[in-house]
Amino acid sequence: MIPRRKTRVVHKGSVPVGGDSPISVQSMTTTRTDDVAGTVAQIHELEALGCEIIRVAVPDRAAAEAIPAIRAQIQIPLIADIHFSHRLALAAIEGGADGIRLNPGNLKKPEYVREVVTAARERGIPIRIGVNSGSIRARDQLQVVEGERDIVPLMVERTLDYIRQFEDMGFHDIVLSLKASDVLATVAAYRVVASKCDYPLHLGVTAAGPPGPGTIKSAVGLGILLAEGIGDTIRVSLTGPPHQEVEVAYEILAALGLRERRRPEIIACPTCGRCEIDLPALIEQVQEAVRGAPPSLRVAVMGCVVNGPGEAQEADIGVAGGKGFGFLFRRGKLLRKVPADHLAEELAAEIRKLGEATKNNP
């Protein structure tokens, strides 16, 4: 891992972004923002999963007017996502938003930008300059291109131009994002802007897609940048319930050793012709068994005797399958041989025992 890029610190409510602060996890609600009850319920679910900053869409006046009621009922910082209307940005700031996201491709008039920056400075809240490749070209210049990598210089140029407008007003509570749906374009844009300023960076691959391919694109793009020391807060953009975004974000950070796991780690082989137990079914049962267990717990579920015993011995608790049976291990020691049709329940029982022991003796 390359040492983390040094940046200034910007506070989004109680959450510091940048400097030596932990890389925070963000998400965005999928509810209509003016549905206060539904939006608050979704935010509470995300808070419980470890989401640290939440963003809501503000496409109209009703959404902006819902900000105070939502803010009063949640614990994490609330960011208002603004695109075409500076008046909505001003209303969200007045309503108590902890930060604003502005898209340079959609809010261009300098006089409007000045009004929003002035209001944010008076309230003491930050602004994210959030560039998306899909909105950076002028509408009359849209064209079909091979990928999006040709647009990187324009994304960087537009970002730096917006920064200059803010800096000319003495405003420096800025976070930057330069997102494309193309992974390599995203990586290139962040690398360039990281070399040109010391503002903290919000990482993400925009419109990454459904959970399967979207998780892969996000893990690759964000993983490359984070391993290079680039990035201060992340949002994984997946099509579907936002709880998946938070779970994937923590898995990415944990895999790089940048945050602790939020749930136990399950190590499992991919299965092959040597596997002689129903491993997929066993894995499903194990996933249920580890719910609520300490996140530091490491569980190995292996399908055969080739690598299984070694992997199982290296975990806190593990099983290595054989023909009609499995060997149960706990912290390197063989516990017993278990019939295959009792593996799930006995493994679950040992997970509960170990979880309780870990809680009582952290």
Image (cartoon, rainbow, N blue to C red):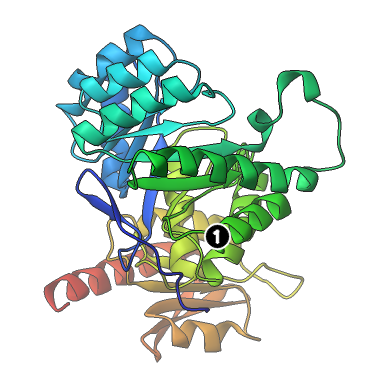
Quarter of the rendering containing residue 167: top left
Percent of width and height locating residue 317: 39, 77
Q: Secondary structure at mark 1?
A: loop
Q: Quadrant of residue 54?
A: top left
User: Does 73 sit left or right of 113 as displayed?
Assistant: left
Give coordinates of residue 272: x percent, y percent: 74, 70
Residue with the mark numbered 1: 196
- What's the residue at 47%, 33% (across, down)? 241
Residue 77 location in percent, x, y?
25, 39
Comparing 267 with 28, the one in front is 28
Residue at x 35% of width, y 8% of height: 61
Q: Is residue 212 visible?
A: yes
Please provide percent x and percent y for residue 172. Answer: 34, 47
Between residue 43 and residue 92, name the one nearer to us: 92
Residue 132 vertical position relative to residue 249 in the rendered view, above or below: above
Vertically, is 73 above or below 150? above
The quarter holding residue 194 reads bottom right
Q: Outermost residue toward the bottom? A: 333
Q: Badge 1: few (under 14), some or many (20 or more) residues near its Cα, within 10 Å?
A: few
* Tag 1: amino acid: Lys
| Front position in the image: 136 or 35 | 136
Q: Give left or right: position of 287 versus 205.
A: left
Q: Nearer the viewer, residue 341 or 174?
A: 174
The residue depicted at 41 percent of the width and 10 percent of the height is 60
Quadrant for the C terminus in the image? bottom left
Left-right relation of 37 to 323: left
Residue at 54% x, 75% y: name it: 325
